Image (tube, helix red, strand yellow):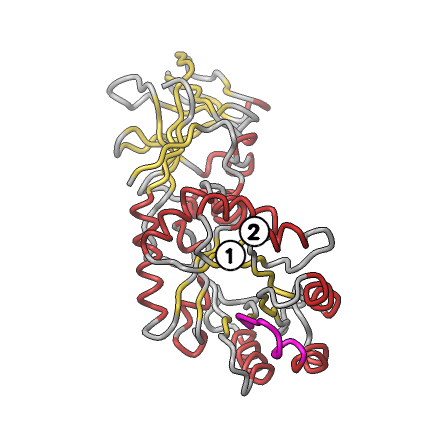
Amino acid sequence: MSTSTLTIDLNALVANWRALDALSGEGTETAAVVKADGYGLGAARVAKALAKAGAKRFFVAVAEEGAALRDALGPTPEINVFSGHMAGDTDMIGDMTLTPMINSLDQLTRHIEALPNAPFGIQLDTGMNRLGMEASEWAAVANVALSQNITLVMSHLACADEPDHPMNAFQLQNFKDMTQGIDVKRSLAATGGTLLGKDYHFDLTRPGVGLYGGAPFSAAKPVAYLSLPVIQTRDLVEGEAVGYGNAWIAKRPSKIATVSAGYADGLIRAMGSGISVYFGDQKVPVVGRVSMDLITVDITDLHETPRALDILNSAQTVEHLASAAGTIGYEILTNMGARYTRRYAG
């Protein structure tokens, strides 16, 4: 193996979607968020697997992502665009039959005037102060919006990863107040909201990171596996240093392997020695600093010199890497480098 190989387990992905679908409960549809190129794992392949499993609605961040997904999925699934109907998106939304989640009065006016009778959703701001109409804005345009081809009213939870956070109940009540009495499907829950229970499910849940093995879905199966080829090995005597800044000093005669990947490939420099690699089920420590293209590891205790080492597997998931880097799994997944050879299993 001459290149780093990122293996995406589509069976695990589908199993995660089915598990979250079961948690969503009877009468609640489970969609799938495949923005940011399927969280870095390839939106087309990911979405095709999920569509085959039963997902009928997909969410992307921007219209360009929606257009690419439409090419991959064909005409049947509904593709929703979180950013709404942006200036310049009209032809793409119309031609590719995308459903924008309208975030403002300006977007609503643009959509109705440019694409009359075309479907759309409404995104409400229930307290996150990021995207969506505030209560007063929604009250002013609700009658107009509800008289058009509206498919969904949604909002997004700010603190769903913390089940006991008072913001969850606050936003839930706001969402209920803002949508009371409307005859349109409603959605509040992404992955974290799905785990909060049926009060948050409404008509549609839309899991994202949980599909790909990320927190807060602790029961998720790992989806991403990353194997790094060994470029070179060398023997050190006690007292010799490895890497930039002499960050690691050998305390015994040691064998060091240099593997092909670094922070240019999404393996963040801040991970440092807080991560390991694996040779089969044997844990091997990373030593020295993570550099742009290379990582050094101490293979002294291995019984043989490996050709490749695994940095993502069932024992060390994206959440472990994220914790070591002081970040979240989303950032690790979406920064997986273009230099990896991607392989799909399942």
Above-or-below relation of 332 to 292: below
Above-or-below relation of 320 to 121: above
Does the CB distance between marks 1 and 2 fall below 8 Å?
Answer: yes
Looking at this view, is 156 or 94 the one in front? 94
Q: Residue at x 43, y 37 (%)?
A: 275
The residue beneath circle 1 is 79
Image coordinates of residue 240 in percent, x first then y, are 48, 16
* Occupied quadrant, residue 54: bottom left
Q: Which residues are magenta?
A: 144-153
Is residue 173 visible to us here?
yes
Q: Residue at x 31, y 60 (%)?
A: 19
Looking at this view, is 68 or 298 the one in front? 68
Q: Which mark is residue 271?
A: none
Residue type at numbered disc 1: Ile
Quarter of the figure that contains the N terminus:
top left
Image coordinates of residue 50 in percent, x first then y, are 37, 52
Q: CA distance from mark 1 to mark 2?
A: 9 Å
Nearer the camera: disc 1 or disc 2: 2
Looking at this view, is 59 or 109 the one in front? 109
Q: Is 146 covered by the magenta stretch?
A: yes
Residue type at numbered disc 2: Met
Above-or-below relation of 14 to 314: below
